[in-house]
Structure formats: C-alpha cells, structure tokens
Amino acid sequence: MHESEPDDPLWTRKPLRLALLRGSFFLLPVLLVAGLGRLTSGSWWGALGGALVAGAVVIAASGLIERALGRLGAALRHGHWRDREGRHFSVAGVSLQVHDDGRQIWLHETGVRRLLGLRDDPPDAFKARFSRHWRHAAELGLNGKGLWLDAADVHRYLGQAPNRMDPVRLRLRTYLDRELLQPAARRRSR
C-alpha cells in the first residue's frame, strides 16, 4: 500500500469496487431464494424462478432497501447512545440533532419540541415563538425536512419562558450552555 493512499479496508473509495461490494450484498438474498426454490420445488426450474423473482424485487427496491437499512442503523445508534448525555447530544432521554455551520449552532425542532412539550404546536406558532431564529433544512444545506432553531435563541427563550424553573427546561438550558454554546465560543475565539 502506498503512503498516499488512504486507509480504506473495504476499498470503497473507488466507484467500481463499491458497486461490486453492494452487488455482492444484493446477490445474497437472490441466492437464498434460489436455494429455497430448489428445496421446495425439487427442480432447477423452481430455483431459477425463485432467483428471477428475488432478483426483480432486489433491483426494484434497492434504493428503498438501502434507505431503510440506513434509517434502522441510525435509530439503533440513537437508541443506544441517548442515555449518555454530553457526548451524543441527548437530554433527559431525548435525542437532539445538532448542526454547527461555523457561525451558529442549530438544533432540529423535533427534539426541542419533545423537551419543551410543544409537540402539538402548529408550525406557524412554533416559528413565531422563535421568530427570525429558525431556518429550513435546505437553507442550511442539509438533507431532510423540518426547522432548525438557533441554539443561542433556544437558550435565551428557556431563560425567559414563564415555566423556566421546570427541571427538564433547566437541564436543557444548562446543557445547551455547557456542552454546545461555550465550547463553540471557545473554538471560534481561537
């Protein structure tokens, strides 16, 4: 291995090799269904028919399969790490999605809604609550849907809200200050 090549044990940096790796993973269910067809029908025609049907399903649903597996992996990671606060952006068992664009820190609305008990707030009322301090995901160059709220504004809102002494809100405000806003301010001051 040359010094200039990155350490990539699966060789996925090359498009052809990545396609071959993906193809081998999609070939596995086709072979399994073909073997099942051979066992159940007792003939090679059953195996061929099973392989053709499985191949058609895999080809038709390959993008859907990859997205579903990606979502499942993300859900398992969030479920596993959400109790470890301070490292994986979780407060009171609620996972927070955080995006730092270099100037501001943004929080996805779903976690903030759950923590503040504002799940039933209509989108316009939620936007008005954080007026001029929210962006759509596309405005920040992110995939997905939903609003992203400025973490500093959420921190300010939590300090001025009528029920600011609620333990979950106090914990969220402290967490935002200690784990997100202060480290970002130190990084930017260097």
Image (spheres, rainbow, N blue to C red):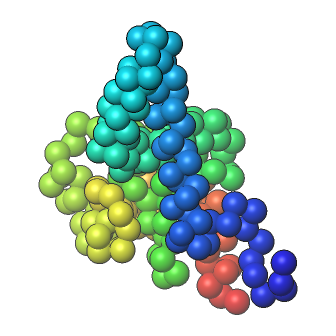
The residue that appears at 50% across and 42% down in the rendered structure is: 27
Is residue 50 in view from this perspective?
A: no
x and y, in percent, of residue 35 in the image: 51, 23
- Position in image of residue 172 (x %, y %): 53, 48
Closer to the camera in the image, 44 or 125: 44
Residue 23 position within the rendered picture, expressed as x and y whole percent measured from the top left: 50, 51
Rendered position, 34 above or below 86: above
132 or 157: nearer the eye?
132
Residue 123, image x and y in percent?
18, 51
Question: Which residue is rendered at x = 43% and y = 53% of the image?
Answer: 158
Report the front residue among 126 and 101: 101
Rendered view: 166 above or below 89: above
Q: Is residue 91 left or right of residue 143?
A: right
Q: Quadrant of residue 53?
A: top left
- When the figure is inspected, residue 173 is found, relative to residue 104, above or below; the finding is above
Position of 21 with respect to 59 (left or right) is right
